[in-house]
């Protein structure tokens, strides 16, 4: 953001809110950046000569005679191989003590890929976690969030997934990360010796919330550089998107927009879609996969943030503490990977999808039995077998601590089926029963 | 001279323009951004200020930038070559665009102007004609594409001349028509029509009388949709809306399928144009792509064009309907379109209705659904547009404005249910709450009684009743416990489970089970009803459960086997055997 010779300076603000300032100025372009007493701001509205700026770091201490100068360009990021291994703040400035990155300056939040030029995602991303690989298989080019309550270890699981995934670059976009979590990611990446293939853009809870709005665009501009220009497989981690949406609602509220459901702006769906739809399988081989975190309020997925997210993303991974097995598990009912059928049985063994369905159906029967038990009713023999099966299934397959290959997951499932059920009770196709049933 | 204007205000994609002359509601204009022309549509006029919604990102736009009004509304180009096309919401051809990324202000022509078509005249000089009458035809792939008197032509015309059979491109004059005042009008193979206006160039729109077979049992048997009918699929995310819609698109008995991907995921569109060129239409054996047109305005494409996308798709359907084809329009999802309306209404600071949606939402939705229908063309032939929209209710709660407005407009209701989806009972259509009004139409009943069998409607109602009873029994069993209810409750519950597992559930990813023709649906329903009509005498509920489970397993294997194949017969025999073991 270098100072340009032709820029004009204004010194009279007409209105100030916690997140925005308004002033009279001419020749201002929509979306362009400005500085308000040295604080970075962006044009969000013009009406005649009245210009409204969103001030990223908040307007504390901004006086009506603040100096405002316009940069004549929207937010940009300098991209090159030098990004690798580096940590940046929301403005793309290094926070790791290293030098500024040199490279081509690109506008963030750029255009969308022509849908006709996309390719169908088809490459499996194995994670070793059976709750994901077996029941909710991930595919490169997919976008999928973790839905988790704030007390669940979503950042740890996400770091595990990222480090086990076979990708060329990992880009971390941290929004409202606690300082501890920021250091956790840093150490996890360093310990894995993977630092050179990681780029991080981080906004911690110590920094102003509106700054978070810049993080996804920064991270995805870097991702597009590696995926489009370098044809690399890029995995983008965005945590926590709920805090991003909260920041959106702060700005829209300050701009007097009529809120829709849950005080969120009416454009929440489009705002989130613009980010998530950057996930893509490109024709030249590069890809962007997005794994995000959306924290929930007490498991409530009907709130506007997880609800809109669910309609945009290609499924969701739902974490839940399971009291029967004592593990944190990937909830098989609420979790879903919409792209799983693109790889199941194609990149994995033929029995994959039938095993998945049978395993979950029997687990559902166990939940029904559990309800009966809680209501004080006698359980049938089948109910009892289901309950025993559910415990083993949760411990050996659904738990996030599992780290095995997909063939091992399938074999484990067959073993559990044979231990507790007859072939007919599983409802699996006869030809697969003939081939795989453990006698 | 064209009206000009200057930009005076910008909030996201809502731009205020100071104009120097007359402007019309919904008139289009170009905003000049440093040489790039951005298309926009007038949505409100106050004095000399016009509010326009821009179909592109407004990044970099400045006050004072010049605006030129075009004197016309958003129009679709209609002519041979639309079939198999992939367009954006404004009907730009996405396949001819350069580069991987969409470029602002890049507009491509929907039709190929060089390509030659083999034209055959159908009218002769001296014929009296009116709008939508057929003048000639060209072969577009497998179909005979009619060249019509443009829909815009009002009143009667006389054919003055018509081109002889031969190869022409779409811009060649193929006929000259003389109007009642004696003025001549030139007609080519391409015509334009404003997308937000319904095409009414037909004699009448009678009540639907045929069903449109989809191969999905829970639709065709339980809640059939009529040819020319309307339906909608509301459901929370993850309940299989898209899978069900794609199943209908693949298997629906229609000549032409237009898919409007409105504000949804790009990868879903990719699935269509990756798989459809390979997949085969079960009714004709041709490739699916040969009957499909894709209009896609995915969720990351400009919001304002979402609204345009459903109208463009409907206009293309109406165009082919006027040629006597049966068209099926699928829009996923109409909620995104409603949200686009909400965003604009909000930016214009209109007084909001429920959930901040504009107050005329219900009227807009009803008007749109009303464009579907079976029509009698000028020449007595018929054509149809069947419309099925999906709705994405916020929080999965069906008591929200878009679902409620749509329920008033659509005649079939396929309610997807979270609970069924959680249990992987797909398609997760709630068998009790869902309905098809068409099942009550005497015309439809008569057709079904004839095409399937006499007494079919009663069978369907009976099956529905078994399901409803089973659900009531399940509630009782849950409250009172397995031992607390008589055996007959268990029996009734398991009969409904049999209907659910062996009939209502269907594997959309299995090559055989995914498509179930009507004859096979009838065969299976007969088998199931025969079992349900029997009275059993189980010793205890455990025996009842395990016997029905075995039954269900055998019938599922039947569903997975080729109809009337050796495997199918084998499972059928074991079913008979199971039944004979439990004769009462």
Image (cartoon, coloured by chain):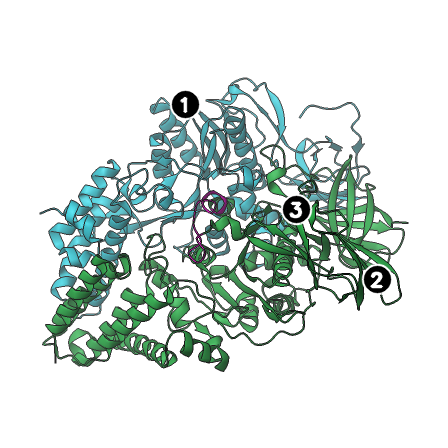
Chain colours: A cyan, B green
x, y percentage for residue A128?
A: 28, 36
Report whether B480 appears left or right of A133.
left
Q: Can you say whether A251 is above or below B435 in the image?
A: above
User: What residue does disc 3 label?
Assistant: B117
Chain that bears disc 3: B
- The quadrant the N terminus of chain A occupies is top right
State the residue at coordinates (36%, 57%). B514
State the residue at coordinates (32%, 37%). A347
x, y percentage for residue B340?
A: 62, 55
Chain that bears disc 2: B
Is residue B274 highlighted in magenta?
A: yes
Tags 1 and 2 both on a single chain? no
Q: Can you say whether B41 is above or below B107 in the image?
A: below
The span picked out in magenta is B272-285
- Residue B178: mark in rendering: 2
x, y percentage for residue A170?
A: 43, 29
Disc 3 crowd rating (10 Å Cα; few below 14, some 14-19, many 20+) is some
Q: Nearer the viewer, residue B191 or B196?
A: B191
x, y percentage for residue B274?
A: 47, 42
Report whether B50 appears left or right of B96.
right
Report whether B454 appears left or right of A88.
left
User: What residue does disc 1 label?
Assistant: A195
At numbered mark 3, what does the secondary structure look like: helix, strand or loop? strand
C-alpha separation, residue under disc 2 versus residue under disc 3:
25 Å
Is residue A9 highlighted in magenta?
A: no
Q: Nearer the viewer's eye, disc 1 or disc 3? A: 3
């Amino acid at each position: 953001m270098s100072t340009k010779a032709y820029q004009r300076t204004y010194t009279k603000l007409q209105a100030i809110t916690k997140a925005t300032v308004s002033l009279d100025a001419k020749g201002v372009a929509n979306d362009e950046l400005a500085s308000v007493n040295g604080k970075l701001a962006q044009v969000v509205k013009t009406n005649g000569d009245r210009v409204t700026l969103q001030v990223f770091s908040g307007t504390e201490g901004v006086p009506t005679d603040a100096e405002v100068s316009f940069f004549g360009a929207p937010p940009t990021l300098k991209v090159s191989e030098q990004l690798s291994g580096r940590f940046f703040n929301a403005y793309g400035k290094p926070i790791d003590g290293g030098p500024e990155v040199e490279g081509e300056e690109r506008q963030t939040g750029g255009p969308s890929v022509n849908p006709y030029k996309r390719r169908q995602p088809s490459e499996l991303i194995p994670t070793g976690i059976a709750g994901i690989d077996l029941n909710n298989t991930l595919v490169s080019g997919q976008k999928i969030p973790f839905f988790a309550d704030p007390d669940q270890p979503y950042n740890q699981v996400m770091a595990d997934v990222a480090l086990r995934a076979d990708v060329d670059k990992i880009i971390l976009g941290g929004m409202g990360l606690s300082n501890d979590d920021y250091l956790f990611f840093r150490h996890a990446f360093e310990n894995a010796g993977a630092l050179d293939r990681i780029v991080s853009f981080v906004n911690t809870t110590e920094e102003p919330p509106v700054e978070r709005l810049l993080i996804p665009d920064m991270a995805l501009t870097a991702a597009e550089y590696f995926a489009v220009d370098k044809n690399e497989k890029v995995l983008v981690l965005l945590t926590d998107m709920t805090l991003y949406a909260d920041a959106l609602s702060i700005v829209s509220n300050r701009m007097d927009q009529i809120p829709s459901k849950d005080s969120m702006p009416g454009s929440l769906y489009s705002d989130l879609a613009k980010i998530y739809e950057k996930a893509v399988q490109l024709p030249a081989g590069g890809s962007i996969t997005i794994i995000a975190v959306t924290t929930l309020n007490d498991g409530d997925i009907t709130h506007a943030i997880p609800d809109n997210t669910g309609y945009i993303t290609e499924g969701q991974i739902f974490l839940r503490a399971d009291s029967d097995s004592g593990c944190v598990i990937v909830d098989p009912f609420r979790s879903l990977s919409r792209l799983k059928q693109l790889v199941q049985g194609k990149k994995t063994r033929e029995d994959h999808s039938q095993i998945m369905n049978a395993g979950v159906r029997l687990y559902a029967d166990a939940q029904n039995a559990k309800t009966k038990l809680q209501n004080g009713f006698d359980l049938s023999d089948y109910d009892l077998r289901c309950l025993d099966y559910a415990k083993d299934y949760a411990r050996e397959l659904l738990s996030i601590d599992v780290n095995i290959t997909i063939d091992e997951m399938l074999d484990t499932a067959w073993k559990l089926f044979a231990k507790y059920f007859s072939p007919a009770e599983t409802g699996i196709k006869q030809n697969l029963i003939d081939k795989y049933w453990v006698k | 001279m064209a009206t000009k204007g200057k930009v005076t205000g910008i909030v996201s994609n809502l731009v205020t323009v100071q104009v120097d002359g007359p402007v019309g509601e919904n008139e289009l204009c170009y905003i000049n951004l440093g040489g790039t022309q951005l298309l926009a549509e007038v949505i409100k006029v106050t004095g000399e200020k016009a509010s326009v919604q821009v179909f592109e990102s407004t990044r970099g736009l400045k006050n004072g930038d010049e605006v030129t009004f075009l004197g016309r509304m958003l129009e679709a180009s209609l002519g041979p070559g639309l079939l198999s096309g992939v367009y954006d919401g404004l009907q730009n051809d996405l396949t001819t665009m350069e580069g991987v990324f969409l470029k602002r202000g890049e507009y491509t022509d929907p039709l190929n102007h060089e390509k030659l078509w083999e034209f055959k005249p159908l009218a002769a000089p001296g014929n009296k004609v009116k709008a939508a009458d057929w003048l000639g035809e060209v072969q577009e792939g497998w179909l005979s594409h009619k060249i019509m008197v443009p829909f815009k032509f009002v009143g009667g015309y006389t054919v003055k001349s018509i081109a002889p059979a031969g190869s022409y491109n779409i811009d060649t004059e193929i006929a000259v028509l003389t109007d009642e005042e004696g003025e001549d009008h030139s007609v080519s193979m391409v015509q334009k029509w404003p997308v937000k206006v319904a095409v009414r160039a037909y004699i009448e729109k009678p009540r639907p009388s045929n069903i449109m077979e989809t191969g999905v049992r829970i639709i065709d048997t339980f809640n059939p949709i009529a040819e020319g009918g309307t339906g909608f699929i509301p459901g929370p995310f993850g309940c299989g809306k898209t899978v069900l819609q794609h199943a209908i698109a693949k298997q629906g008995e229609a000549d032409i399928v237009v898919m409007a991907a409105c504000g949804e995921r790009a990868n879903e569109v990719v699935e269509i144009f990756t798989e459809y060129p390979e997949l085969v239409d079960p009714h004709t054996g041709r490739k699916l792509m040969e009957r499909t047109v894709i209009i896609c305005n995915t969720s990351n494409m400009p919001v304002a064009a979402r609204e345009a996308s459903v109208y463009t798709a409907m206009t293309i359907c109406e165009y082919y309907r006027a040629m006597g084809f049966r068209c099926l329009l699928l829009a996923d999802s109409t909620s995104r379109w409603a949200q686009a309306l909400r965003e604009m209404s909000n930016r214009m600071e209109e007084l909001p209705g429920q959930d901040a949606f504009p107050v005329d939402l219900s009227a807009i939705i009803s008007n749109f659904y009303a464009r579907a229908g079976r029509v009698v063309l000028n020449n007595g032939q018929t054509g149809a547009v069947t419309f099925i929209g999906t709705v994405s209710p916020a929080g999965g709660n069906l008591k929200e404005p878009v679902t409620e407005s749509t329920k008033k407009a659509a005649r079939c209701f396929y309610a997807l249910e979270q609970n069924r989806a959680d249990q992987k009972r797909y398609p997760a259509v709630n068998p009790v709450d869902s309905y098809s009004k068409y099942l009550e139409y005497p015309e439809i009943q008569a057709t079904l009684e004839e095409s399937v069998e006499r007494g079919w409607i009663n069978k369907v109602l009976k099956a529905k009743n078994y399901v409803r009873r089973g659900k009531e029994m399940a509630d009782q069993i849950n409250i009172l416990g397995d031992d607390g209810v008589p055996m007959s409750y268990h029996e009734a519950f398991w009969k409904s489970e049999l209907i659910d597992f062996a009939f209502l559930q269907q594997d959309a990813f299995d090559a055989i089970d995914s498509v179930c023709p009507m004859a096979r649906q009838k065969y299976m329903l007969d088998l199931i009803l025969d079992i349900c009509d029997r009275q059993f005498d189980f010793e205890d509920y455990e025996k009842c459960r395990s016997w029905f489970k075995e039954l269900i397993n055998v019938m599922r294997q039947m569903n997975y086997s080729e109809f009337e194949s050796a495997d199918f017969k084998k499972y059928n025999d074991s079913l008979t055997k199971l039944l004979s073991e439990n004769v009462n």
